[in-house]
Image (cartoon, helix red, strand yellow):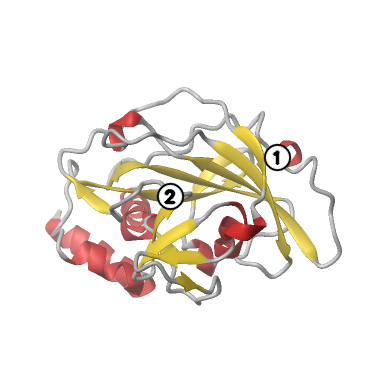
Amino acid sequence: MATRNRAVLRVVLPLLAAASAVLAGTGPANAEDGYRYWGYYHVENGAFAFAKTGPSGYTPKDGAEEAYRFGTSTASAGVKPRADLAKLDFATVCKDTTAATGKKRVAVLLDFGTAADAAGATIPKPKAACAQVPTAATGQQVLSAVAQVRDSKGLVCALDGYPASGCGDPVKNASIPSSEPTVAFALSASDKSAAGTTSDDGSRTPLLVGGAVVVVLLGAGGFVLSRRTRTS
């Protein structure tokens, strides 16, 4: 198992140079080890598909739907947003946003997770918003159109201030629910003032930073994806 895990890391780390600091001190993962992070998903054919890149490395098309979920994932199980995609499709989320020349509309779902990962903090309610951004905007720019992003050394650590601290923290003896019921998502307008990211030092950083800014899922979720690919 250790040999296979090292092979997985050799594939993932070159794509996730910014995430190497998170993984460096954790050692080989096993079935009980996990990470607490924001997972990034695309919605394809009415189902969640784990993203193969970070949002800064992906350009969604007009009419696309993106989703994020905060929670704990292990090398053998991920945690998906608890949205009912039959009720929260692009047409529903973006119904009140008029198409504009030179712009695209992307539906974004944000699931802030459960009390199991909240450490006693108040959990924001899940929300869905329609981002209207330039046609060439990356997933990172789409995300920052609907949520305030906190990052640290290139890792997206929090959305809309949640969680208040931490960034891709390792979790021992992680417990992953086999299934979860769907929950209600509040429809909200995109917040144009949220564009950009706020670093832990309090500075504002430009939204377009190449491949450096990634959701923490790429420190752990990219590992999950590669593990799944090799074991399928």
Examine the rendered structure and indicate whether residue 119 appears above or below residue 161. Answer: above
Seen from the viewer's position, the closer of residues 136 and 119 is 119
State the count of labels: 2
- Element at badge 1? helix
Toward the front, the furthest residue is 202
* The quadrant where residue 120 appears: top left
Callout 1, which amino acid? Val
Which numbered tag is attached to residue 225?
A: none
Say which residue appears at 48% left-offset and 73% top-offset.
205
Toward the top, the furthest residue is 181
**Residue 53 shown left or right of residue 228 in the figure:** right
Classed neighbour count for the residue bearing mark 1: other residues with Cα under 10 Å, few (<14), some (14–19), many (≥20) = many
Q: Does residue 163 appear in this view?
A: yes
Examine the rendered structure and indicate whether residue 78 appears above or below residue 40. Answer: above
- Element at badge 2? loop
Horizontal and vertical percent position of residue 97? 79, 47
Spatial separation of the CA atoms under disc 2 and disc 1: 23 Å
**Residue 178 shown left or right of residue 129 in the figure:** left
Q: Earlier in the sequence, mark 2 or mark 1?
A: 1
Q: What residue sits right under mark 2 in the picture?
A: 161
* The quadrant where residue 129 appears: top right
**Residue 32 shown left or right of residue 134 in the figure:** left
Say which residue appears at 15% left-offset and 58% top-offset.
26
**Residue 106 shown left or right of residue 150 in the figure:** right
Q: What residue sits right under mark 1 in the picture?
A: 93
Say which residue appears at 49% left-offset and 32% top-offset.
82
Callout 2, which amino acid? Gly
Say which residue appears at 38% left-offset and 59% top-offset.
218
Horizontal and vertical percent position of residue 47? 57, 39
Horizontal and vertical percent position of residue 85? 61, 33
* The quadrant where residue 167 appears: bottom left
Which callout, 2 or 1, points to the residue nearer the camera?
A: 2
